[in-house]
Amino acid sequence: MAKKKEISLEKSDASLTKEDIIVKEKLTSLGKQLIKEIEAGQSPYFETVVRGRSNVLHGEEGYLYLGDKKEKRVFLNVAQAKKFMQTVAVAAKCKKFKEENLHTSIRGLFYQLKFTLGEDLDEELFEEQSESNELVEDLEVALNLKREDLNLSTDRKGVVAGNLVIRDKFGGEETEIDCTKQGRSGWMIPSDVDNGMEFIDVDVDYVLVIEKDALWQRLNEDKFWKKENCLIITPKGQASRGCRRLIRKLADMKLPIYCFMDCDAWGWYIYWTIKTGSMNLAYLGRNIATPEAKFIGVTMSDIERYDFLKKLTINAKEVDLKRAEELLSYPWISRHQDWVKELKIVLDTKKKIEQDALQGPRLTFVGEYVREKVENKQFLY
């Protein structure tokens, strides 16, 4: 029986990539460490970095990251025993996913684990998905991995068009995707843009990230990406992990990243999470943040450049004003005087502008606006 099991594992490994095998080895090493401690008569423990706000830092590099504070989860501690057991169960299940070369969502993981202790026991391993979600993040931090490396996928969100060719190895097949030939729909960004994903050709001058799908469609219809030799990406609101990771990878290729958002609380938030990352994903640090990103608009200063916008501002909501004040309190934002000026204009006038307003004079003006901003380097950093 032992021999058959060994052969089965070898066949499983043969279907895995080099990166998959490294992930599997990290999970295996964690298990071996725990067994070694038990055999030595010690209480096994699991160590991870504290992910609370008190341990989130922002450095000169321009992105949020975790500090050095650590916490231990000890099996023989009554208060920690269940969480320790849950952590081991999550790691074991992810190792199984790697061996099977199958993917699921964090919701799927929750249901796989929910009754792992057995049908004859009343005790559930997890009562709520939030419990298993937190432990997935612990594993990401402790093993220096992303959940996508653990074969855990998230919702697809975000669309691309432009001169980008990708080779996608997935489900036992290999597909070449040409992002110039995706019609009106564009290429949908998957949650994992690293494993089995390879850039074959990226022939563009810059990347334009557009907050709203409607504006992306407007520019795609005009073939803006073809005329200006750029990639156009819309995160369709807040950018997903996969979308932010794709933007980071494109920035690593020395491509300028320009962000085209609303001048309001939501637009600012989307931009700054792309640029610096976010508190809850600080453990991914630079892997998901793009400090090089620049904000081309819409800005309150555009009213001085484009007279028609004076008639198209709308009243700022309380959330917009509170967000402006909050952003001014962040040292990594307040050190940029152009941003200070913009946010103070919003607070003083209690007005805001949506990127849709640029369609006021004519629908094609949106492309003219972006082109002018890029050519004249009119950015907020």
Image (spheres, rainbow, N blue to C red):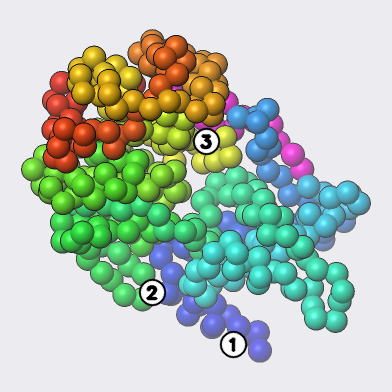
Element on which disc 3 rests: loop
Tell whether position 70 is magenta: yes
- Image position of 301 (left or right of 241): left
| Nearest to viewer (mark 1 / mark 3) | 3
Tell whether position 35 is magenta: no
The magenta region covers: 57-72
The residue type indicated by label 3 comes to Ser
**Which of disc 1 and disc 2 is earlier in sequence?**
1
* Residue at 40% across, 21% down: 351
List the residue tagged with mark 3.
Answer: 278
- The image shows residue 44 at horizontal and vertical percentages of 80, 53
* Residue at 55% across, 46% down: 144
Query: Please, which residue is most extreme toward the right here?
Result: 78
* Residue at 59% across, 87% down: 4
User: Which quarter of the rendering shows the N terminus?
Assistant: bottom right
The residue type indicated by label 1 comes to Lys
List the residue tagged with mark 2.
Answer: 171
- The image shows residue 162 at horizontal and vertical percentages of 18, 50
Q: Is residue 263 above or below residue 252?
A: above
List the residue tagged with mark 1.
Answer: 4
**Which of disc 3 and disc 2 is earlier in sequence?**
2
User: Which quarter of the rendering shows the C terminus?
Assistant: top left
The alpha-carbon separation of the residues under discs 1 and 3 comes to 47 Å
| Nearest to viewer (mark 2 / mark 3) | 3
The residue type indicated by label 2 comes to Gly
**Which of disc 3 and disc 1 is earlier in sequence?**
1
- The image shows residue 219 at horizontal and vertical percentages of 19, 45
**Residue 39 visible at all:** yes
- Image position of 190 (left or right of 142): left
